[in-house]
Image (cartoon, helix red, strand yellow):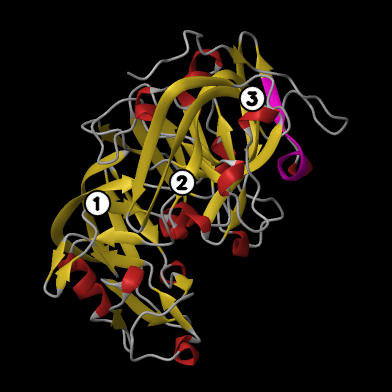
Amino acid sequence: MHPRSTGTCALVLSLVLRASVTVASATHDDILTGVRLEDRGSHLTAIIPVQEVENHWTANVSIGGQQVILCIDTGSTPSWVTGFETATGSRRSYNVSNSVTARPHGNERFYEAFPQSSVSGIVVEDTVTLADGAATVNNFAIGVVDHKSPGIADQPFDGFLGLGFQGGAGPNVSSLNSKPTILESLMPSLESPVLALNFRDIKSGLTTGPYMEFGRADQTKYIGNLAKISIKRSTNRWTAGNVSFSINGTQMTEEADLVFDTGGDNFINAPFAIVNEYYSRVTDWRWGSQGTFNCTIIVPCDSHLPDLEMHIGNGTAKIRGEYMTGRPLNGPVNPSWSQASLSGLCMAGLQPFGTYPYGTCPQIGLIGAPFFHEQYTVWNQAEPSVSYAPYAQ
């Protein structure tokens, strides 16, 4: 048996007012350096500053008064943080013993698996605050890692802020899947049961950093009308069904179910036939064939790649080729390649999933960073649905 705390998840939203902040709207400086909570009668909205680090979006989070950096992950439900016993290098960690508000769940444990790594640990309830008091959830259930594989230890953050769905039959079911996420906990007090993500790429020249906003969508941040897709709720993931593709305007026939995943990596997955057609228009691409790079397509980082269009729900999202070069390689990809030969090579932004002629790739297809760099997204937990539109210029 796994004893559970009998405490309920109490919600506290605090109003933060600064000299440069008005209740009606937030300035660019507020988004960069502060937090706005706008009181709209009995309902609130909150803007949380976000940092983009090594192809992940992270937020500053306080757990029981201890500051950590968590990866914003719509691809999973559990939230977890590195325990002080497993902290390495300069990474921050959380110590249950140093929190006066922590409530351990007895012997209850959680386990979370990823394609190349895994974590496990105890479950506690504690006070979790986003940014500098933007939104606080008391008695929030979170995992505290006491064991993790090397792949996780190498990440540039201290844990994950899960934004999937409570419950569900996902591939990594753990005790934390039955606990409410931050968004689910905040929903009763928000103006609208939505989370808006403005993850526009910093190289776009904006003076403001990326951010997420609980409670509303900002119509000034996108062009035209929001397209929408209803989410398939067979798992605890934000899964878009029947996604199809066009390459430089040519429609492909294959479709796929893909997961909107901000915590994945700098790529989009597609069936092999689409990936093969896409790279038939590219010179000097290759397959990786070792370790984490098995079933991975490699391209020169200065490649001129085709545009990709994704037909999702009642709309189409265009991903320009400049966002499809992916990220620079950071490890060996083929025994015959020297480390020097990796210079200038990137793990491409379109990758296959499922079975392909040379083996088997990951079985779950993702919609990752290239999409979020180009599209403003609104996640409606109540419907559920994801809406999207190109960023305003």
Residue 337 coordinates in the image, percent (x, y): 38, 90
Residue numbers of the magenta segment: 30-38
Quarter of the image where one finds residue 112 = top left
Which SS class for mark 1? loop
Which SS class for mark 2? strand
Mark 2–mark 3 distance (CA, rounded to whole Å): 29 Å
Instruction: In the displayed orientation, state which residue is furthest to the right.
Output: 19
Residue 290 versus residue 275: which sits nearer the camera? 290
2 and 1 marks in contact (CB < 8 Å): no
Identify the residue at image location x=49%, y=74%.
330
The residue to which callout 3 is attached is 135
Which SS class for mark 3? strand
Q: How many marks?
A: 3
Neighbor class of circle 3 (other Cα within 10 Å; few <14, some 14-19, many 20+) is many
The mark lying in front, picked from 2 and 3, is: 2
1 and 3 marks in contact (CB < 8 Å): no
Mark 2–mark 1 distance (CA, rounded to whole Å): 25 Å
Residue 310 can be seen, yes or no:
yes
In screen coordinates, is 8 left or right of 177? Answer: right
Residue type, label 2: His
- First in sequence, mark 2 or 3: give its number: 3
Mark 1–mark 3 distance (CA, rounded to whole Å): 32 Å
- Rendered image: mark on residue 364: 1
Residue 211 can be seen, yes or no:
no
Residue 118 versus residue 323: which sits nearer the camera? 118
- Rendered image: mark on residue 147: 2
- For the N terminus, the quadrant is top left
Residue 260 coordinates in the image, percent (x, y): 36, 45
Residue type, label 1: Ile
Identify the residue at image location x=85%, y=34%.
20
